[in-house]
Image: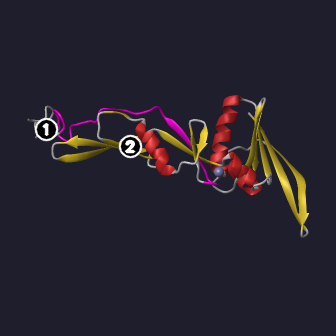
Amino acid sequence: MECIKCGKESEVGLFCVSCYVPKVKMPKKVFVEHCRGCNKYRFGGKWNIAGRREVERYLASRIKGEFKVALVDLYKKEATIVVDAKNGDVEYTMPFAVAVEETLCKECSKRRGSYYEGILQLRGNENKVEKIAREFKKLVLKKTFITNEEEMHGGYNIYVGSSRAMLEAIAKLGIKDYKLSRTLHTAKQGKRVYRITVSVRF
Ligand SMILES: [Zn+2]
Ligand SMILES: [Zn+2]
C-alpha cells in the first residue's frame, strides 16, 4: 500500500510515518503546583505524596485516542505518543498544555514558621491584583519563601521571608507607585531588623 498523501510506503494505516498524525484528544490545560519544600505535587485540589513520575503518569492517562503508549514530560510540556507502525513503534512528540507553579504547601509554610520580613499588600482592581499576585509570587519564590498569603475582601496580603527579595520583585514588575512603611522587628546583636510593608493600589 502507498501513503495516500505522498505515495511512499504506508506504515500506519493509510499513511507513511511522516504523513501520519496521531489521533489524540489532549485534556484541557492542567494546572499543577509543586512544593519547593517537600517536593509534593498538587493537582485536582489535593496535595498528593506523588512524585513527578506519578503526576506524569496520571496526566498521560488523560490523553485519549488511538495509540499504544502516551508519555508526558511535565517540564518540557510535551507528550510523546507511541504508535504501532508496520516496521515497529514510532514516536510523535506534541505539545501538552500544563502549567507548573512553584510554591509551598501548607505544612511547609508552617514549618518555616511565621518568619517574614516583608508584606506586600495589593488592593483595588481584582483582576489586576490577581495577576500581579501571581507574577510577584513567581518572582519572589526564586529568591525566598512565602510565609503566608491572606485573601481578604478587596485585596491580597503576601508575607515574604526576605524584604530585599520583595523589593526586587516589585521593581522587576515595574511597580513604582506604592506606599512603604517600616517597623522595627528585632534588634539582635545591635543590628536592627525591620519589617517592610508595601501597599499597592490598582
Ligand atoms: Zn506520506
Ligand atoms: Zn511541602
Q: What residue is rendered at 75% in x and 31% in y?
A: 124
Under tag 2, what secondary structure?
strand
Left or right placement of residue 55 versus residue 107 in this view: left
Res 79 label: 2
Residue denoted by label 1: 10
Ligand 1, image quadrant it occupies = top left
Q: Position of residue 25 (x, y in %)?
A: 37, 31
In magenta segment, residue 22: yes
Q: Mainly helix, strand or loop, the magenta region? A: loop
Under tag 1, what secondary structure?
loop
Q: Residues within 10 Å of mark 1 (few under 14, many from 20)?
A: many
**Amino acid found under the numbered disc labelled 2:** Ala
Q: Nearer the viewer, residue 121 or 31?
A: 31
Inspect this view and state whether residue 123 appears.
no
Is the Cβ of the residue at disc 1 closer than 8 Å to that at disc 2? no
Q: What residue is rendered at 29% in x and 38% in y?
A: 67
Quadrant of the drawing holding the N terminus: top left
- Magenta extent: 12-38
Examine the image and state in which quarter residue 136 appears.
top right
Q: What residue is rendered at 87% in x and 51% in y?
A: 182
Q: Position of residue 73 (x, y in %)?
A: 43, 48
Left or right placement of residue 119 versus residue 168 in this view: right
Q: Is residue 110 above or below residue 149?
A: below
> Is the CB atom of the residue marked by disc 1 within 8 angstroms of ligand 1's nearest atom?
yes
Q: Nearer the viewer, residue 4 or 136?
A: 4
Q: Is residue 123 above or below residue 118?
A: above
Inspect this view and state whether residue 176 appears.
yes
**Amino acid found under the numbered disc labelled 1:** Ser
Residue ranking furthest to the front: 49
Q: How is the model colour-coded? A: secondary structure
